[in-house]
Amino acid sequence: AQSVSQHNHHVILSEAASLELGCNYSYGGTVNLFWYVQYPGQHLQLLLKYFSGDPLVKGIKGFEAEFIKSKFSFNLRKPSVQWSDTAEYFCAAIFSGNTPLVFGKGTRLSVIA
Amino acid sequence: SQTIHQWPATLVQPVGSPLSLECTVEGTSNPNLYWYRQAAGRGLQLLFYSVGIGQISSEVPQNLSASRPQDRQFILSSKKLLLSDSGFYLCARGQGTYEQYFGPGTRLTVT
């Protein structure tokens, strides 16, 4: 079955540490990939997306993600996190055609001073 | 502006009572509309989606239902709420294979 997996449930980092959140999907065809973020008390927001082309995509707030087709992965990275990056991060995919997003279970990031 | 409105923002209802959550979308025609439920540690569970007026696809069997009486209106309903229906309900809109945008959500507590 088509699915999205996020293996880190909760990540705790100190400010200025580097971040990498894992995301893997299971599907052999063309896939559109997304990272969403939900800051405390706020809406889900789109961080970045990959449809085609350059597999390294840059999003808002200094985030980037790399699509590695051979690994079925779309990991989210940020070189230096800030306290304001504390949030829940969701990886999601559209697997084919006009179908809904499939979400991973989310990773909670806590950044401490 | 392509804004998504959801109301109410919070709701406390007794078990067995009916439910109606409303979602309306501005600034776009013929959007795909979605209802999700978000639970801690479980991500977002797709409940229903609609590609047009009167067209509803259900993703999970449950005592909830959805309707789309107008192009930009999507309603989530129940005739009799269960305790397990408590959660955070999100409405989203999308177009084809592109990203989805989410509303502010409704926090439902069933007592």
Image (cartoon, coloured by chain):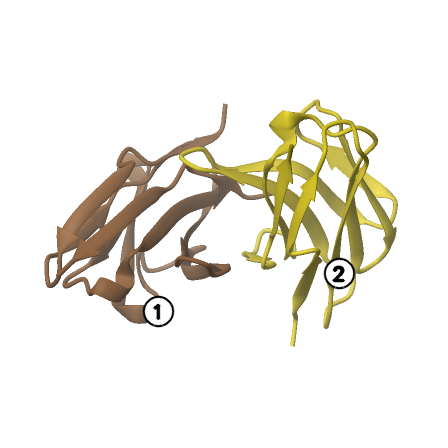
Q: Where is residue A15 shown, x and y percent of the image? A: 13, 61
- Which residue is identified by label 1? A60
**Relative to residue A87, is residue A93 depicted above or below?**
above
Which of the labelled discs sits on residue A80, or is there none? Answer: none
Q: Write down the colour of chain B.
A: yellow
Res A96 visible:
no
| Corner quadrant of residue A59 | bottom left
Q: Residue at x 27, y 49 (%)?
A: A109
Q: What's the amino acid at mark 2? A: Thr
Instruction: Name the foreground residue: A101 vs A41.
Output: A41
Residue A81 seen from this side? yes
Residue A21 in the image: state x and y as whole percent.
25, 46
Which color was chain A given?
Answer: brown
Residue that label 2 marks: B24
Give whichever of A53, B15 is nearer the camera: B15
Q: Is residue A90 above or below residue A45?
A: above
What is the quadrant of the N terminus of chain B in the image?
bottom right
- Left-right relation of A53 to B77: left
Chain where mark 1 sits? A
